Each structure stands twice: as structure tokens, then as C-alpha cells.
Image (cartoon, rainbow, N blue to C red):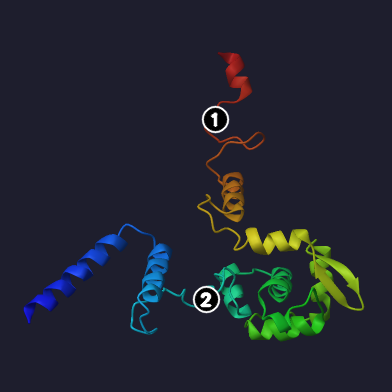
Amino acid sequence: MSEPVDQEIAAIKAVLSALAPLSEKAQVSVLEYVTKRLELPVGLGLQIPTLHPGPPLQELPPIQTTPAHIKDLKSQKKPRSANEMAAIVAYYLSNSAPADKRKATINQKDIETFFKIAEFPLPEQVRATLPNAKNAGYFDLAGDGEYKLNAVGHNLVAHSMPRGSGSAGKPASVEIDDRVRSVHDPGIDRPGNASPNSPSPRQFGQR
């Protein structure tokens, strides 16, 4: 009883040894030929399973580098004036807003809406906000009450805000205060206001 089993094992080893150095395509060809040559029924499990590529990997969404909400953008850029906030609104609507909400120009209604959403104080004269921002150099007039953020305004929001975020020295106001203090310091001698203990030119001449 063991002899047929031993012969079967030996045959399997021989087949495997013969197929091992061949490519997958060659192995399939050999097995198909042997199956036909020996007139073996199709479906005996002699086929080598082929690997099918899986579904393509889904592309990762692009990294969001700009805040997707006007309030977040305002917090990041820290505008110090209505002009700067108007530039932020225009930048947001042209670059960061949802696709169906994006627009290339803004108007007074956008100022009122997005100043409120961002919790930025509305100016007393809202209608003057965009004209003032245009005069500051951030916008170009697009007509019919519409204003378009220009390159200066874009660079302001994208690259120059928040202002004063570097490790600079004293603010200009402090430096001015220091100079004013030096002018009014009674301990500093100035022409025409000499200290009582300072020698006069006449005293120098007597020496």
C-alpha cells in the first residue's frame, strides 16, 4: 500500500523541481500541456492561481494649508484695521471658501456678512470700508460696487500678516517716546538751556 504513495510523492517532487526554475507563465504552459497530453479532465486543480491587482488606492485629499473658515483665518492673520480685515475677506472668498461660495470680487454686503461671522468689529461707516481699502492700495475697483483684491492685498494677507510677528526690537512708538523723553529730560544740556553749573563761554575766556 505504501509503494503507490511513495511513487506519488516522488512524482510531485519531480514536477515541483522541474517547474521551480521556470517563470509563472512557463509553469502554466507546462501544466496545460501535461493536462492535455495525459487527457486529464479540466478542473483538477492543476492551474496556478494568478494574482489580480487590488483596487487602486484612493488619492489622499490635498493638505489644507489655509484655514477653511473665515474666523480661523482672521485669528491666524490678526488684522489690525478694517482695511486689513477687508483684504482677508477677499482673500478668503477667492482662495479658501467652499468651491460653490468662491468669488473673485467682494462688495459691501460681503464686508457686513463676513466681518460679523469672523467677529470683527464693523466700522461705523461700512460703506467706506472698501473705498478706504482701495485707497490703501489693497484693492482695484471692479465696477458696480465690486472690488477685486490686487497683488499688494494678496501678498499682504499671504505673506505679511500677522504684522509684527518677528522678534524685532522696540516698537516705533516706544522709540519715539524715548526720544521725546531725552528732549524733555532736565538733566540733559542743550544749546540755549545750559545747566547753572556749566561754565559760560566768558569763563572759558578768562582762563
Amino acid type at image mark 1: Ser
Q: Give the image location of residue 196, x and y in percent.
A: 55, 35
Q: Are marks 1 and 2 in contact (CB under 8 Å)?
A: no
Identify which residue, 81 or 7, lies in the foreground: 7
Q: Nearer the viewer, residue 38 or 80?
A: 38
Q: Residue at x 86, y 76 (%)?
A: 146
Q: Is residue 145 left or right of residue 66?
A: right
Labelled disc at residue 4:
none
Q: Secondary structure at mark 2?
A: loop
Seen in the image, is 59 located left or right of residue 125?
left
Mark-to-mark CA distance, 1 and 2:
85 Å
- Please name the residue that numbered disc 1 is placed on: 198
Residue under circle 2? 58
Seen at 84% across and 71% down, the residue is 131
Do we see residue 194 in this rendering? yes
| Location of residue 202 in the rendering, given as x and y in whole percent from the top left corner | 63, 21
Question: Which quarter of the image is occupied by the N terminus?
Answer: bottom left
Q: Residues within 10 Å of mark 2 (few under 14, many from 20)?
A: few
Dot 1 lies on which element? loop
Viewer-side label of 1, 2? 2
Q: Earlier in the sequence, mark 1 or mark 2?
A: 2
Q: Residue at x 12, y 73 (%)?
A: 6
Question: In the figure, is residue 40 to the left or right of 201?
Answer: left
